[in-house]
């Protein structure tokens, strides 16, 4: 047996509970031999790139579920959806207003299309450093001051579950005659129950990209692009969809999306009602914790994202994640310096919440209060030296490697980020600040892998812009 297969088998049989995506939580029954169902585009099974039969019907079901004019199922995850949406909405070399807390795929689209990106920055929670969004007025100010922007791209919900005021932002953006693109990769469950915020499509967004697999019972890599209104043409979406999405799509992934639609039709209402009940009970229990706590947001947010904060305890986020993993057999989704994210879905049963609360209660009783109460700072305070596409095109030929403590003032030659969530702390061409270096060092000291650094732990800066 190969090593990867052996590892997957051991993980499946270990009893470790997945507090992470995919949303099926390994609980969906499907008694098939995957090899016997794995086909290519044979006669009668339609073509994802020119659907006119069974896959067209599936796209129609998904569109109806979310209230979209049209849906495009993709097997390359939300990444291909983001690339498609931005490419279709903004002309090559044009300008986009981009949420600085966007996933790396949005920056890749900026690079590939040689776009100019104007950034909108999040406010941050002073205790944890969590991004807490921005207002429609913030969006309006940039659009008013920066004429020529062709589309606005935002992320909602965020990885931590913050939901922006999509309706007012959409109204603002449409006042300038341009489309609003929403990366709702973590929001495929929104709008399916009264217990959660509405889906961005119902709030006025023009293009919404959702990873079905993140919060619904669907195989990993299965996502959808939904469009509504006429600001972005369907044929433009299809053109770029055919560029970025594999020409050998997995019928197993697409069938899992159809199975999810069947599940929502037959069991969805009851499943989400139970989900709401379990979440409410769990959150109520956690009020009794003394040092650890669940982060709350004053505005709209996805209560299914359990952000377990450690900043008032003697533990770091990495230490909490380590205890959950090794002592209690609970594998979290994300580890940050001051919090851990446990992702839930409608497929989690009562036992999930019982195990997690029992673990948190015991850990909470053993840890002490915080040694200090230094406030967290936002990650995105870097200026920009050159456009992303110009900076990254020099990669591999015009950069130098320097130690972190000598990088302040230089222009980053690569992305620097933690995965998950894949939101770049530094984008190629951005000036490296003192606070950026401090945050990188904080995560490294907490044994959290920071990607984009050199093997020696240094950083690459553009030689032509060396301070």
Image (cartoon, rainbow, N blue to C red):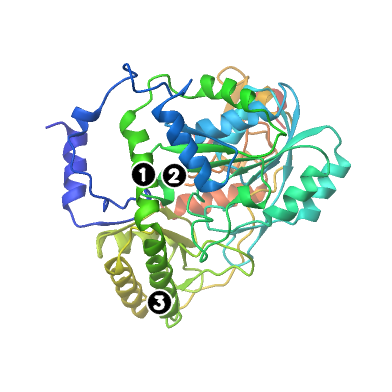
Of labels 2 and 3, earlier in sequence is: 2
State left or right for residue 78 relative to residue 323. Answer: right
> Is disc 1 placed on a helix, strand or loop?
loop
User: Is residue 392 positioned above or below 343 on the image?
Assistant: above
User: Is residue 201 positioned above or below 298 on the image?
Assistant: above
Cβ–Cβ under 8 Å for marks 2 and 1: yes
Question: Mark 1 to mark 3: distance in Å?
Answer: 26 Å
Question: Mark 2 to mark 3: distance in Å?
Answer: 26 Å
Residue at the image point whose x is 66% and y is 52% from the top: 203
Whole-percent x, y for residue 317 in the image = 44, 61
Q: Residue furthest left?
A: 1
Label drawn at residue 218: 1
Label drawn at residue 185: none
Q: Between residue 403 and residue 36, name the one nearer to us.
A: 36
> Is disc 2 placed on a helix, strand or loop?
helix
* Quadrant assignment for the C terminus: top right
Whole-percent x, y for residue 378 in the image = 64, 55
Q: Which residue is mark 3?
A: 281
Residue at the image point whose x is 22% and y is 44% from the top: 30
Whole-percent x, y for residue 15 in the image = 19, 57
Q: Between residue 246 and residue 122, name the one nearer to us.
A: 246
Q: Local crowd at mark 1 within 10 Å, few (<14), some, or many (≥20)?
A: many
> Is disc 3 placed on a helix, strand or loop?
helix
Q: Which residue is mark 2?
A: 212
């Amino acid at each position: 047996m190969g090593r990867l297969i052996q590892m997957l088998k051991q993980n499946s049989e270990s009893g470790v509970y997945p507090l992470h995506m995919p949303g099926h939580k390994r609980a969906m029954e499907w008694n098939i031999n995957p090899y016997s169902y794995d086909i290519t585009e044979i006669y009668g099974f339609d073509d994802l790139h020119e659907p006119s039969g069974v896959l067209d019907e599936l796209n129609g079901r998904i569109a109806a579920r979310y209230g979209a004019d049209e849906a495009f199922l993709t097997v390359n995850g939300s990444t291909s959806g983001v690339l498609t949406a931005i490419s279709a909405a903004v002309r090559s070399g044009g300008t986009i207003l981009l949420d600085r807390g966007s996933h790396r795929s949005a920056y890749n689209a900026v690079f590939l299309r040689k776009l100019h990106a104007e950034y909108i920055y999040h406010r941050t929670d002073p205790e944890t450093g969590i991004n807490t969004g921005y207002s429609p007025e913030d969006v309006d100010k940039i659009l008013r001051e920066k004429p020529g922007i062709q589309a606005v791209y935002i992320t909602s919900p965020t990885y931590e579950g913050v939901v922006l005021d999509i309706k007012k932002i959409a109204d603002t953006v449409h006042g300038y005659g341009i489309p609003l693109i929403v990366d709702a990769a973590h929001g495929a469950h929104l709008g399916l129950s009264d217990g959660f915020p509405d889906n961005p499509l119902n709030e006025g967004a023009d293009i919404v990209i959702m990873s079905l697999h993140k919060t619904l019972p669907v195989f990993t890599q299965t996502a959808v692009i939904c469009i509504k209104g006429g600001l972005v043409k369907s044929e433009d979406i299809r053109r770029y969809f055919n560029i970025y999405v594999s020409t050998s799509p997995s019928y197993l992934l697409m069938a899992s999306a159809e199975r999810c639609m069947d599940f929502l039709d037959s069991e969805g209402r009851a499943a989400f009602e139970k989900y709401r009940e379990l979440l409410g009970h769990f959150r109520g229990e956690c009020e009794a914790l003394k040092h650890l706590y669940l982060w709350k947001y004053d505005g709209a947010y996805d209560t299914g994202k359990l952000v377990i904060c450690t900043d008032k305890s003697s533990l770091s986020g990495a230490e909490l994640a380590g205890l959950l993993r090794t002592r209690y057999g609970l594998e979290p989704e994300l580890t940050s310096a001051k919090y851990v994210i446990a992702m839930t879905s409608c497929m989690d049963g009562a036992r999930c919440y019982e195990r997690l609360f029992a673990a948190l209660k015991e850990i909470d009783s053993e840890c002490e209060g915080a040694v200090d109460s230094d406030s967290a700072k936002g990650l995105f305070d870097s200026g920009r030296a050159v456009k992303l596409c110009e900076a990254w095109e020099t990669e591999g030929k015009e950069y130098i490697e320097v130690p972190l403590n000598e990088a302040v003032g230089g222009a980053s030659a690569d992305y620097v980020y933690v995965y998950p969530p894949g939101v770049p702390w530094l984008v190629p061409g951005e000036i490296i600040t003192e606070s950026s270096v401090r945050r990188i060092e904080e995560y490294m000291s907490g044994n959290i892998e920071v990607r984009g650094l050199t093997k020696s732990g240094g950083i690459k800066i553009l030689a032509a812009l060396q301070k």
